[in-house]
Amino acid sequence: MFTDVADLKDRKIMVVGLGRTGVSLARFLSEHKAKVTITDHKSRAELHNALEQISDLEVDFDLGGHTPKKFLEQDLIVLSPGVSPFLKIFDYARNHGVKVTGEFEFSNWFVKEPVIAITGTNGKTSTTCLVYKMLKESNVDVWVGGNYGPPVVDYLRSGQKASVLVLEVSSFQLEHCERFTPQNIIFTNLAEDHQDRYKSMEEYVNAKRRIFMNTNQATTSILNADDNAVIELARDPSVQRGRIFYFSRKKALEPQIMNIGGVVNIKNELKVRTGPEIEMFAVGDIKARGAHMIENFMAALLASREHGATREAIQKVINEFRGIPHRLEYVRRVGGVEFFNDSKATNVHAVKKALDSFDENVILVMGGKDTGLNYEPLFDHIRKKVKSLILFGEAKERINRDIGDATETFLIGTFEEAVLIAYQKSRIGDIVLLSPGCSSFDIFDSYIERGNYFKEIVKNFK
């Protein structure tokens, strides 16, 4: 719709949602002389802090609800992250010819630099962080954001001209994508998630599939060869338009992958081919917890190598990376018991990956918002590795029905009590693991708040 920021002048553009991204959108649009309307279902009193941040702007407001007439007056409606595009008011606007899009797609209309886009069900954030660190360590001028870090509109406002942008992309952001054209795509894995938003697994997969909409001969897709759902996606003609690199932890796939390009994990080394030469990287002494981190290293090095990361820088990041907060984060050791914060594990696949990082003697704390997930695939993992399963939150009954018979299970009233019971049930040599398998929104504002509260409770244990 627009290709240059100059096109925004005098255009009527509505911003839906006045959170952090909504504030940045309002400032960006005002800086480029658009006629801005901001709407939010919250009242002025609830939005006091956000409104203070834009008090100097000349914008129109529609707060405490949404007025249909105002939607029809717009040239464009831009949704902040987290605002569902499926609300009837947006269908009403679309049916009257008003364009509706999301901040991620909108901002990328004006990005001229190459983009590395990272998506998948799990591992997105760690992989995004790794690509950024590998490039930064190589003195490449890189900017990171999207679903991880600041929204893309902040890059536009910064005036920075990076050599490459590294963007984590969620399915929610991909729902709006039509023109988004990354130069590199990393697809980490694909499993059931967000079933409270999507009517079926197919609908979720179709949202993820949109990242490949505009692939061309200049696109390099980096795909997980060990994930059958990702391999199924790779057969799509849109993916086949560009070059494909695969990564795998299976030695049996080495001949095929080395033939077409990619990386394979063989014992304590990564064997890599992105051109005529084969390179080796050591992973025997990595500090980041979790076998799945090897997959993140493999995907990240393939993308960063494409944009100038040096061999030395990549190896240094592999050696020194300790993970990121709330992803199998080591908290402390108390009385011979180790505590790990994996609050970012908001689906079944992520919990399974977390349990794969431990041999046994796990006391697992699970629960949160009930998003309709099926927990039965965890049954064997729970039976083999979990001594006690401590359940809390809105989803505890569902989880108990699916996997409660796999081990000793307790349904607890509050989050604080759940963590305390987990500690009381532990013995020397045990692992207490918060890996909820649910979103946080029944009790907390985010997985970050949940993880921080877990750490606060644990740090008070004697």
Image (cartoon, rainbow, N blue to C red):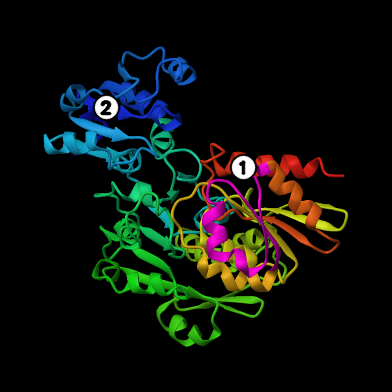
* Residue 174 image label: none
Q: In this view, does 248 lie above or below 391?
A: below
What range is drawn magenta here? 386-415
In the displayed orientation, state which residue is furthest to the left: 96
Q: In this view, does 137 lie above or below 386?
A: above
Q: Nearer the viewer, residue 341 or 243?
A: 341
Please indicate, yes or no, whether residue 138 appears anywhere in the rendered image.
Answer: no
Q: Are marks 2 and 1 in contact (CB under 8 Å)?
A: no
Image side of residue 335 versus residue 130, left or right: right
| Residue 17 placement (x, y as % from top left) | 37, 29
Q: Which of 249 and 141 is in front in this view?
A: 249
* Residue 450 image label: 1
**Residue appearing at x 61%, y 50% in the figure:** 343
Kindly identify the amino acid type of the residue bearing the numbered disc 1: Arg
**Residue appearing at x 31%, y 16% in the figure:** 59
Image side of residue 143 versus residue 362, left or right: left
* Residue 14 image label: 2
| Residue 261 placement (x, y as % from top left) | 43, 76
Which element carries disc 2, helix, strand or loop? Answer: strand
Q: Would you identify the image quadrant in which residue 340 lies?
A: bottom right
Image side of residue 13 versus residue 134, left or right: left
Magenta-drawn stretch contains 84: no
| Residue 345 placement (x, y as % from top left) | 56, 55
Kindly identify the amino acid type of the residue bearing the numbered disc 2: Met
Magenta-drawn stretch contains 402: yes
> How many marks do you count on the picture?
2
